[in-house]
Amino acid sequence: EAGVVQSPRYKIIEKKQPVAFWCNPISGHNTLYWYRQNLGQGPELLIRYENEEAVDDSQLPKDRFSAERLKGVDSTLKIQPAELGDSAVYLCASSHSPSTSEQFFGPGTRLTVL
Amino acid sequence: GQSLEQPSEVTAVEGAIVQINCTYQTSGFYGLSWYQQHDGGAPTFLSYNALDGLEETGRFSSFLSRSDSYGYLLLQELQMKDSASYFCAVRGGLSTGAGSYQLTFGKGTKLSVIP
């Protein structure tokens, strides 16, 4: 079984530039999560999808961050414009359902904003 | 709000036993999870405790006391490959709605296993 796929693995951009991250969850997993992990910290939830619906986006900075999950499969997280403080690892995870205890994480995208 | 506390670093000898503690404060609680993350890698699920008591999975065990808002991860027969960061995570921030499925992670404990 293929795991959660994310791309790109690394991204370096100048501040004020846009950036997008892509995630393909495990086949059959209806729930998809985007997390941000700062250095030396645990992952912090940005948004959770159940199928194509964003059901928990309370911690997504909506002024510059947006996400979509068309057709309830893969998802894209966008930042526009990026700020220096956005440098972090952006992790995507998926699970069968929101009540499933185990979440499967992708390798993440390491974003550096210069 | 929610807060979790766990030691920032632990060092242990190969073959030994180590316990990583986690205390939490939360307005709503459904369970405590543990994840392992190697440097540059993805977090991987280790265990989940919804009820009080000890859960054992191979060399790893996890314990929960809901009344004490406390849990721990026990690693036995330590191996060099166990060197990683270990995160406890609480499921549930709000007692209802979307927050009941939210996973809040601690800052992690960096375990170093030495020969």
Image (spheres, helix red, strand yellow):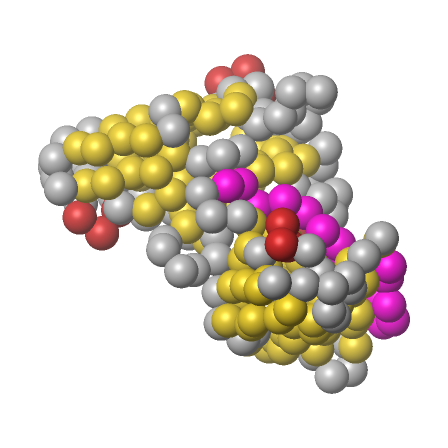
- Outermost residue toward the top in this view: A71
Residue A106 position (above or below residue B44)? above
Q: Which one is nearer the viewer's eye here, A36 or B111?
A: B111
Q: Is residue B4 visible?
A: no
- Outermost residue toward the front in this view: B115
Q: Is residue B30 left or right of residue B109?
A: right
How many marks do you count on the picture?
0
Q: Which x, y percent locates residue B20? A: 65, 71
Q: Is residue B93 left or right of residue A112?
A: right
Q: Quadrant of residue A103?
A: top right
**Residue at 12 percent of width and 35 percent of height:** A14
**Residue at 72 percent of width and 33 percent of height:** A96
Q: Which x, y percent locates residue A66? A: 34, 34
**Residue at 85 percent of width and 53 percent of height:** B58
Q: Quadrant of residue A1?
A: top right
Residue B84 position (above or below residue A15)? below
Q: Which x, y percent locates residue A108? A: 45, 36
- Report the span colored magenta: B41-56
Residue B30 position (above or below residue B18)? above
Q: Quadrant of residue A62?
A: top left
Q: Is residue B74 visible?
A: yes
Q: Is residue A14 left or right of residue B39?
A: left
Q: Which one is nearer the viewer's eye here, B109 or B95?
A: B109
> Magenta residues: mostly which secondary structure?
strand
Residue B49 magenta-drawn?
Answer: yes
Residue A69 magenta-drawn?
Answer: no
Residue B38 position (above or below residue B83)? above
Q: Could you tell me which quadrant the C terminus of chain B lies in?
A: bottom right
Q: Which x, y percent locates residue B64? A: 78, 71
Q: Is residue B11 left or right of residue A68?
A: right
